[in-house]
Amino acid sequence: MTRPQTTRKKRANGVESRQRILDATVEIAGERGYEGTSIAAVSAKCGLPASSIYWHFKDKDDLIAAVIERSFESWLAAVKLPGEEAGTPLERVSTMAANVAKSLVDAPDFLRLGLMLALERRPAEPRGRTVFLQVRDIARQKIAEVVETLFPDLDEDAVQALTTYTVAGADGLFIHREISGDAVDLVAMFELHARMVFDGATRMAARSPE
Amino acid sequence: MTRPQTTRKKRANGVESRQRILDATVEIAGERGYEGTSIAAVSAKCGLPASSIYWHFKDKDDLIAAVIERSFESWLAAVKLPGEEAGTPLERVSTMAANVAKSLVDAPDFLRLGLMLALERRPAEPRGRTVFLQVRDIARQKIAEVVETLFPDLDEDAVQALTTYTVAGADGLFIHREISGDAVDLVAMFELHARMVFDGATRMAARSPE
DNA sequence: CTCTTGCTGTAGCGTTCACTCCAATTGGAA
DNA sequence: TTCCAATTGGAGTGAACGCTACAGCAAGAG
C-alpha cells in the first residue's frame, strides 16, 4: 500500500495502439457512417488485430463513442469569441466564425460523423450519437453567451432563435463544402454567415430595446 | 403489330407491390442510412419476400436510387416563388420559404436520407447519392433564379454566394428539427431565414449597383 | 530466475448480409 | 381449355458481420 504502485508504467505500446485505433476509426466512420464502419476495416487500417480493438474498447458502440469524445475538446476550443482588443464587435464575430471554419476544414471527420449519427434514427440509439449531441449543446450554449454579450438588449426568445440560426447555418455550410469539395471557401462563407447574423441581430435589437 | 398490345394490362398487383417496397424502403433508409437498410428489413416491413424485391429492382443500390427518384418531383414542386400578386417581395420570399418548410415537415425522410447519402464518402459511390445531388442542384438553380429575379443588380458572384447560403441555411435548419424534435417550428425558422437572406441581399444590392 | 500484467495473434463462433434458384400461383390471351 | 408471362414463396448460397476464446510474448516486479 505504501508502495507507489500508482506509478505503474504503461508498458509497451498500449497507449499508442489506442490512438492508432481511434485514428483509423475516425477516418472510416467519417467516411461510411456507423453501420459502414466494420471492425475488420478498422483493423486493416490500423494494422492491429480485432482482438486488440476489443481489448481497448468494450464493443463497436464504445469505440465510436470514444472517437467522438476524443475529437470533442480540440474542436470546441475553436468556438471562442476573441477579446475586445480584436476590433469592432462585427470583426470579433467574423474572426470567431473564421476560426470555426478553419477547424472544420482541418478536421472534418468529426462533424461529418457526428451529423451522420445525428440524422440516423435507429431504435437503439448508439452512445456516440448521445455524446455528439451533448457536445453540440455545449457549443450551442457558448454561442448563446456570445449573442447575449454582444446584444444584451435582446430578449430570451430572440437569443435562442439567433443561436439556433447560427448553428444551423454552420452545419449547412459545412455540408455544402463536404458535398461540393475543397474548392469551396468555407472561411469566406462563414464570414458571410457572421455578417448576416450580426446584421440580423442588430436589427432585432434596435426594434425591441425596451 | 396492328394489335394494341401496348394496352398490356399490368396484371396482378405488380405496380402496387412496387410502391409498397418503395414506401418501406424510404422509411427504413431514412432512419438508418444506406448500410443500415437491409433487404430483410424492407421485406419484413412491406410483407413481400426478398425475391419480389429483386424482381422489381436490380439490387440494393437500384432500390435506394429509385426511392430518391420517386420523392424528387413532389418535393421540388415546393421550391417555387409565388407570383407578384402575393404581396411584397419579402412576403413572397417568406411564403416560399414557409412552403418548403411545410413540405419538409410532411416528408422528412427524403431529405434525411439524401443528406446521409451526401455526407458519406465510400469509395464506390452509390447511385442514390448521385441522383440526390442532381436533384439538389436543380433546386439550387431554381433558388438562384429567384435571387436574380428579385435582385437584378447583384453580380454573378453575389448571386452564387447568396444561393449557397440559402440552401445551407435550409439544410441546417432541417437538421436542427431532426435533432431537436417536433417541437421545433420549422416554418417560423424558415421565415426568419428568408428575412435574413432578403435583408442581406438588399444590403449587398444597395452597395454595388454599378 | 519466476511471476504477473499488458497486449498481440490466430482461429473460429453464431448471425446477418446481399443475392439467387426455382417451383408454385395467378390472371389474361389464344 | 391450354398456354404464357407476371409475380410470389421459400429455401439456400457464400461472404462479411460483431465478437470471443485462448495461447503467446515482451517487459517490469519480486
Image (tube, coloured by chain):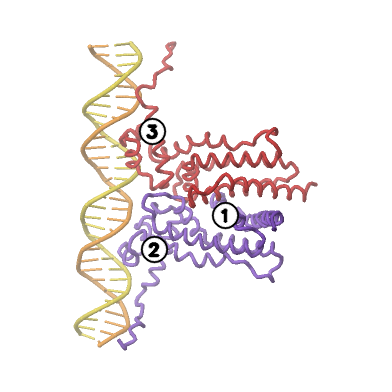
Chain colours: A purple, B red, C yellow, D orange
Residue visible at 49% across and 40% down in the picture: B107
Cα distance in 3D space between marks 3 and 1: 37 Å
Marked residue nearer the N-terminal end (2 or 1): 2
Q: Is residue D23 above or below residue B112?
A: below
> What is the x, y in percent for residue A141?
55, 62
* Circle 2/circle 3 CB separation < 8 Å: no
| Residue D21 drawn at (x, y percent) | 21, 63
Find residue B145 and report its image quarter.
top right
- Mark 3, secondary structure of its residue: helix
Q: The numbered mark 2 sits on a residue in which chain?
A: A
Which residue in the rendered view is the most extreme toward the front?
A: A210
Q: For mark 2, what is the residue?
A: A46
Q: Is residue B66 left or right of residue B137?
A: left
Q: Which residue is the site of mark 1?
A: A164
Which amino acid type corresponds to the residue marked 3 in the rendered image? Arg
Q: Please determine if labels 2 and 3 lie on a single subunit.
A: no
* Residue B20 disc label: 3
Instruction: Give the total of numbered labels.
Output: 3
Residue flagged by tag 1: what amino acid is it?
Thr
Whether residue A86 sits left or right of residue B189 in the image: it is: right
For disc 3, the neighbor class at 10 Å (few under 14, some 14 to 19, many from 20) is some
Circles 3 and 1: CB atoms closer than 8 Å: no
**In this image, A202 relative to A66: left or right?**
right
State which mark lies toward you, 2 or 3. 3
